[in-house]
Every structure is written in C-alpha cells, then in structure tokens.
Amino acid sequence: MDLGSIFFYKYRRFIKTLQIYVLLSGPGLIVMLADNDAGGITTYTVTGAKFGYGLIWFLLLLLPVAYVVQEMTVRLGAVTKRGHAEAIFDAFGSFWGWFSFLDLALVNWLTLITEFIGMTAALMIFHIPPVVTVTIVSVIMMLMVLQGRYWTWEKIALLFAALNLIYIPAAFMVHPSVGEVLSVGLIPHFPGGFNATLFFFLMANIGTTIAPWMIFFQQSAVVDKGMKEKDIPWGQMDTLIGSAFTVIIAIFLVVVTGTVLYGSEVESAAQAASILITTNPWLGTFIAIGLFDAGFLGAICISLASSWAFGEVFGWAHSLNLKIREAPWFYACYFFALISAGAVVLIPNAPLVLITLFVQVIAVTLLPAALVFLILLLNNEEIMGKYRNSQLQNVAAIVIVIAIIVLSTLYGITTLFPELLS
Amino acid sequence: MINIEQVLGDRIGSVIRGWIDKIDGINRKYAVPRIEMSRGVKIALLFLRVYLLFLVLLLGFKFYTLLQ
C-alpha cells in the first residue's frame, strides 16, 4: 500500500470515529458542562477573586474526581437499562429507595431555584426584569422537550453547553501573564497558608464538582439515549472529554477573575459581571452571558433528572422520545418543577440566600448515599457481570468517594455553623 | 378502619386512595432488596444510617440554637 492510500485509510477511519462519537456523545458532555451551573460559576468567580491563580492546580485535581464518579453511571445505565433511582429501589429496597428519591426531589427543586436566581441575576445586568427572564426561560425549556425526540433535545442542549466556552475568549481579553498563570497556578501550594477561608473554598470547589443530580441525570440520560454495553467505551470517552471541558472552563474563569478582580471583595458571579461591565463592557457581558447559560444548562438537566426519577419510581412512561400524550406524568413533573421553581424567585422578599445555603446542606444528606450505592452496585457481579469495577477502579472510586464525603460533609457543617471556621 | 372517600369526599378521596395504593404497590415490589447482603454491604448501609442520624441531630441542634 502506498503512502497516499495509508493516509486516506487513516483519514476515513478518523472521520468514521468522529461520526460515531458525534452520534453517541451527549450525556457525558452535557452533564459535565452543566456541572458548571450558576452555583459553580459563582464558586469559581469568587475563588479567582480571592486567591488569584493560586488554586488552579486544585481545579485540575477535580478532573479525575468528576470522571471516576460519572463514568460509573455510564456503565451502570448501559448494563442495567435503569436510572439510578430505580436501581436503588431494586437493589437496596424501598427504605433507601424512598429516602434517595424524596431527598433527590427536594434537593433538585431547591437547586433549580438557585439556577433561576443565577439566570435572573445575570439578565438583570442588562435591565431585563426577573419575570421576563423566568417566563422566557420556562417557555424555551418547555419547547426543548416538546419535540418528542431525545436526540433533538440533546443536540439543542449541546448548543447551549457550547456557550459555556465563552469564558475562554474572556480569559484572552484580560491578557493574563501566561508565565504567571503557569508558575503560580500549576505548582500545588496554599495561597496565604492553609487557613479556614482557604479550606472553605477547597470544600466549595469539591462540592460544586459532584452533585447528587449529576449521578441521577447521567444514568437516566444513558438509558433514555438507548446506549448499550458495546457503547460503554464511547460513553467513557464522552465523560472524559466532558470532565476536561468542565475543568478547562473553570480554570479560564479563575484566570479572568484572578487577573482583573484579584483582591476585590466579590461575593457572586453576577456581582463580578456588574463591576466589570462598567470598566470593560465586553468582559462584563461575557461573564453575565456565561452565568445565564450556566443557570440555564443546570436547570434543564436538573428538572429532567427529577422527571426521570419520578417516572422510574412510579412506573410512568418516562422518555424524551415520547410525546406528551404518551408520557403525561413525566412532562407534568418537568413543567411543575420549572414553573414552581421560577415562581419562587419572583416572590417578593423570598429567602433566596437561605435557600442557597439550604441546598448545600440538603445535598450533603444525599450525596454520600448516592455515591456509596453507586460503588456497591458497580461491585455486584449479578447486576454488572463483566462490567463490574476492577480492583484499580475500586481503589480510585473508594478514595475519591471518601474524600468527597468528608469534604462535602465539612462543607455542609460549616454552612450550618460558620462560626466554626472563625 | 378510616374510609378516605367518606372523610374527603368521593373525588379527592379516590385520588388519594389511588396514590396510597400506588405507593403500597411500590413498597411491595421492592420489599426484598435484590443485592446480596454481604458483610461489606451491611457495613456500608450501617454507615449511611449512622451518618444520616448524625446529620439529623446536627440539623436539630441548629434548629434548637436558632430558637434560643
């Protein structure tokens, strides 16, 4: 075979691989990009403003953390063809099933409110009233699911996910010193020494990397997409690429705020955007658009995670491939979650700060259980067969899960008792 | 035994009765855990129960301190 033929063969193979990936990608990319939701974007914004580039190395550590946990949901979904809520009921009985399901429904609904808070705050910067934001967002999100095809929903969601990349050009706009980013950011150290504030931010960054809804969402999405055992390597690649993107976006956002807001007292991404829009309108606009998109992406995934879980537990038809008349309860849950969460944000003097803090505490009650169940299920030969966790996967998963449980619990406790850190 | 239909009226009562039956059906369907209760599984579930109890006590304590 001549060189031209070899090149052509390799080119065709690459194109074919790319085509298969585009066809099978989705759940991993979407869940990981939605991981940078409104709360996540706020955490990264404040981390950059507080510690500059100093914690970029820590963000890099979150890549394997996110991948190891979410990859397990791909295998579990593809092998069992069941969502996480149903899998817990089936494997551990109704007590743990109801506990996980009700806790998930509550924490998802509260998180959905925080996504609406992020979206309304972002668009307030452009003088768009919250009622308009909530209405338009709810209508778009309803239209996204009404076309009756999972594939179409997924590709629309991927378009919104791509908007998350806006922080990359934003980082180039602030002209950071690449040498400084690399030298300060990549060498593990604790800027200002290991103290209570730094510890709180480390916990917050871990807490925003793995949330309970992500586990339930990706497993249900894998099932709804119809992925089979043979698709697992593609799902794993999808999750790995998604994990890389989520960390890259977080790092670029930290670079932005670490460059232009380092040392400022910033408490949220919306506040950062408001400050920047007066000095650098484009940059402020980018931060605001990114925050809105993050909230939107989080909202579509969280409301779907709840609807899938309701469908799985109550035995209702639950697929985006079904029309409203074929799965009325599934869509009713989706619409109810959206409308009620949006309405809460519009209530005058609603305790939104309290809700935001409450989310962190309630999430802590569900996350350890969801993670422990994940590991137990992935180790069950009867359920997983040859796709059960290997010894290496177990070591990685157990170490990561213990770290997440300890840090997220401490995060929840310090949210309840902030005086412990002072 | 209380008749829900008599207390709440036929329409609301039958809806609630339907839900109760549904939940009862789910409980019966998943009454026996499928996973084998090996020592590792038992320890993990015990840990989760203790952990949840700890969190509930913590939330209760927070509520108590708020009332003080």
Image (tube, rainbow, N blue to C red):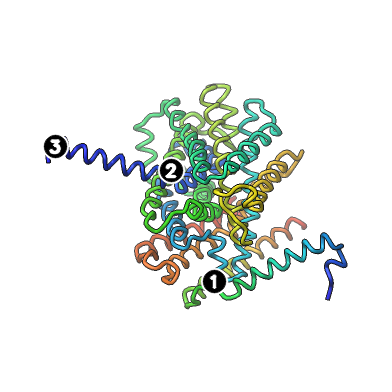
Can you say whether A332 is above or below A165 in the image? below
Question: Could you tell me how far apart the alpha carbons at marks 1 and 3 are, in whole angstroms?
Answer: 60 Å
Extreme-left residue of the structure: A2
**Amino acid residing under circle 2:** Val
**Amino acid residing under circle 1:** Leu
User: In this figure, which residue is indicated by the disc labeled 1?
Assistant: B45
Q: Are marks 2 and 1 in contact (CB under 8 Å)?
A: no
Residue at point 58%, 71% (across, down): A93
Please check whether the numbered discs 2 and 1 fall on a single chain.
Answer: no
Can you say whether A295 is above or below A67 in the image? above
Question: Could you tell me how far apart the alpha carbons at marks 3 and 2 are, in whole angstroms?
Answer: 39 Å
Would you say residue A55 is visible in this rendering? no
Can you say whether A97 is above or below A176 in the image? below
Please state which of residues A37 and B68 is positioned toward the viewer in this rendering: A37
**Secondary structure at numbered mark 1:** helix
Please check whether the numbered discs 1 and 3 fall on a single chain.
Answer: no
Position in image of residue B9 (x %, y %)? 87, 62
Can you say whether A282 is above or below B51 in the image? above
Tell whether A304 sits left or right of B19: left
Residue at point 12%, 38% (across, down): A2
Tell whether A341 sits left or right of A158: right
User: In this figure, which residue is indicated by the disc labeled 3?
Assistant: A3
